[in-house]
Structures are given as C-alpha cells and as structure tokens.
Image (cartoon, rainbow, N blue to C red):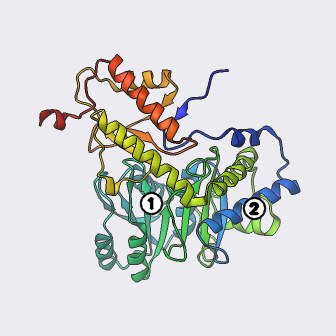
Amino acid sequence: MAQDPWLLTPGPLTTSMTVKQAMLHDWGSRDAGFIAVNDRMRQRLVAMIGGEGTFSTVPMQGSGTFAVEAMIGTFIGPKDKLLILINGAYGKRIEKICQVAKRACATLEWAEDMPVDPNLVKLALARDPAITHVAVVHCETTSGVLNPVAEVAQVVADAGKKLLIDAMSAFGAIELDSRKVPFDAVAASSNKCIEGVPGLGFVLCRVSALQQTQGNAHALTLDLFDQWQNIEKTKQYRFTPPIHCIVAFDQALNEHEAEGGVAGRGGRYRNNCKILVDGMRRLGFETLLPDHLQAPIIVTFHMPADPNFQFQVFYDKLKDRNFVIYPGKLTVADSFRIGCIGRLGETEMKAFLGVVADVLKEMNVKSGAPARKAAE
C-alpha cells in the first residue's frame, strides 16, 4: 500500500495513525458511549478558551464554512448590522454569507498582505451607530497573516458592540482566551490545528448571547440556537451527526492535550514554520509577509522569476515525491502556499526542503527568487 502524501496544506491535513484508527468502528448516534464522547468533546473545546460556565460548544455538521454561516445567521438577526473586517478570501466569504442570508452588513477592507487596523475599526463604529456586531478572521489563510484579534475585541467592546470570530485555521494552536478577549462566538472545525478529519464544524457561543438568538436563523439546519437547545435537552443532534469524524476528533483532542494543549501544538507549528521559511529563503524564495505578521499556519511565497519555473510542474513533481502544497489565492501577488500544520514535525519539514531543492535542480531552476528580487 502506497504511503499517504504529506499534506503541507491549511486543511484537510495529515493526521496521526491513531486518529485514522478511531474511525474503524461503528457507533449508534443514540448510544450512551457516543453521547459520552460528544459531551467530552464539547467540554474540552470550551476549556480551550477558558470559557467554563460562560460558553457552550454548539457542534455543526459540515465543513468549517457551515459553522461560520451558522454563526452569522444565528447571531445576526434581521434588525442587526454586521461590520466585516476583510483582508482575504475568508472575510469576503462572510460578506457573501450575509448577502445570501439577507443580513445588513458593512465592510472594511485591507490588502491581503496587511493585518486589519483596530484604529480604523474604531472610526467605522463611531461613524455608523447601526452596527451591532463585528466579524474578524483570526488567521487569514489567503496569505497567512495573523490579525490582532485581542486589540480588535477591545475596540469592539469599548464601542458596546459584539464580536464574532472566524478562528478556523488558528483555533487550537494560537491562544484565544475568553477571559481576556471579549467575544460572543468563535467558529472553528475538526480538521485544522486539532488535527482531526473533515466533517464537523463547531461554534463556541457565549450562553447569555446565544439565549437571545431564538428565531434569528435563516436556515433550519444552520440554527445554532435550535441545535444547542436540542443537544442540551436530549443529548442528541437534530439530524444525523458525522459520528466517525467525531470519535476521531475525540482522539485528536487526546493527542492535542498530550502535546501540551494550545501552547504545545502552537510551539511545534512555530518550529515547523521557522524551518520552512529559513530553508526556502536559502533556496532564494521570498515570503509575502514579513516575519512579524506571519502566523505559523500557512506561508505564502512569491513565484520565482526563473523562466524555467512552472508552478504546475513544481506541484506535480513534489506530489510525485509525496508532498502536497497549495496554489496561491492572492490578487496582490502571483504566489503559492505551504502549510505548517498537521501531524508534521522537524523531520518532515527538513525532508520537504530537500525535495524542493531536488525538484528545482531537475527543473533547471537556479533560484526561487521572485521577479523584483531578480531585477535588483
């Protein structure tokens, strides 16, 4: 049997053998054993943000975007207005969700290689008193930029507004403490930094805020209030849960805890990121972001200027050697992306760099330097 490729992507990502093995068994969705797994999962996620007693985990079948849409549709009522902070594709997706759900929204937009600016958020809130909520992406994987969520949260709280966070690619590796950072809800999923498999999104909701959302949701299946009420009362999902995904997620949470929680997982990813960036720079590649803006999740690199470099050939040759990377998603620069997350460590990152060097030599690419570097 061929070895699975190493996924240097923002998710789905490489999982441990023990997470995979957790999916080999069948469970009844109403079985006491599965109910216990689900309860444990919900409690552990709340503990990860220091939200015991004030937050509740509302799981949502589907990918992370299902959870984000459920969060927006449930917390933003027909009379509310959302200010969306956009510096990449995932902020734009929240705007699209609002348009489809027919929810009032305004936007503040930055270039994809820039973090959001809390001072501009403050000015926007002062200008438009109709705004009730603000949405921000914690780590915008379009570029890999880390947004200043704590500073934004303080500005939003000072203005008397409510914050919603898309922490899809940061949750579990970058600290988000609800006792220090005021927010009403944060959405994430099973297949990112906790290293589970795709199929489950979840929203950690401030209970006092969630209680005010009854009747807001624009879709039956995406109603967090109704899902929460049903699970609290009956321990059951309203509709069939992704059982194998959830038991694998429970195992992934065991491994996350064993690694030292958010600090331990984030530490490994930061080391992966440093090895990757240092090694790619030695080959001439240039990162889109300066180091102080770079989250240790996914790194965007400029395309090389060498005329022999063709991204599809580069991608295919890496894949032939069992490494999968990601195309770029930027409008500001021709680029590609390499992830630092998943069940990867120093050994795999160094092996990847060796493969990149071999592939460049095979392609007769002398340097990974981008066009502006080549022209200097």
Q: Is residue 89 above or below residue 261?
A: above
Q: Is residue 33 above or below residue 129?
A: above
**Relative horizontal placement of residue 69, taking residue 224 as reference (left or right):** left
Q: Which mark is residue 138?
A: 1
Q: Nearer the viewer, residue 354 or 214?
A: 354
Q: Quadrant of the N terminus?
A: top right
Q: Earlier in the sequence, mark 2 or mark 1?
A: 2
Instruction: Name the amino acid type tagged 2.
Output: Arg
Name the amino acid type tagged 1.
His
Image point 76% across, 69% down: which residue? 232
Q: In which quadrant of the rendered image does the C terminus lie?
A: top left
Question: x, y percentage for residue 185?
Answer: 55, 68
Frontmost residue, 140 versus 217: 140
Crowd rating for badge 1 (residues with CA inside 10 Å; few <14, some 14–19, many 20+): many
Q: Position of residue 311 (x, y in %)?
A: 35, 27
Residue 327 image offset from top left, x and y in percent = 40, 35
Q: Tag 2's secondary structure?
A: helix
Given the current orientation, which residue lies at the most extreme left position?
A: 376
Residue drawn 60% across and 69% down?
Answer: 205
Q: What number is the disc on residue 30?
A: none
The answer to whether residue 335 is seen in the rendering is: no
* Residue at mark 2 to residue at mark 1: CA–CA distance: 25 Å
Q: Secondary structure at mark 1?
A: loop
Q: Where does the image place residue 23, in percent across and percent down from the top left?
A: 75, 41
Q: Which mark is residue 40?
A: 2
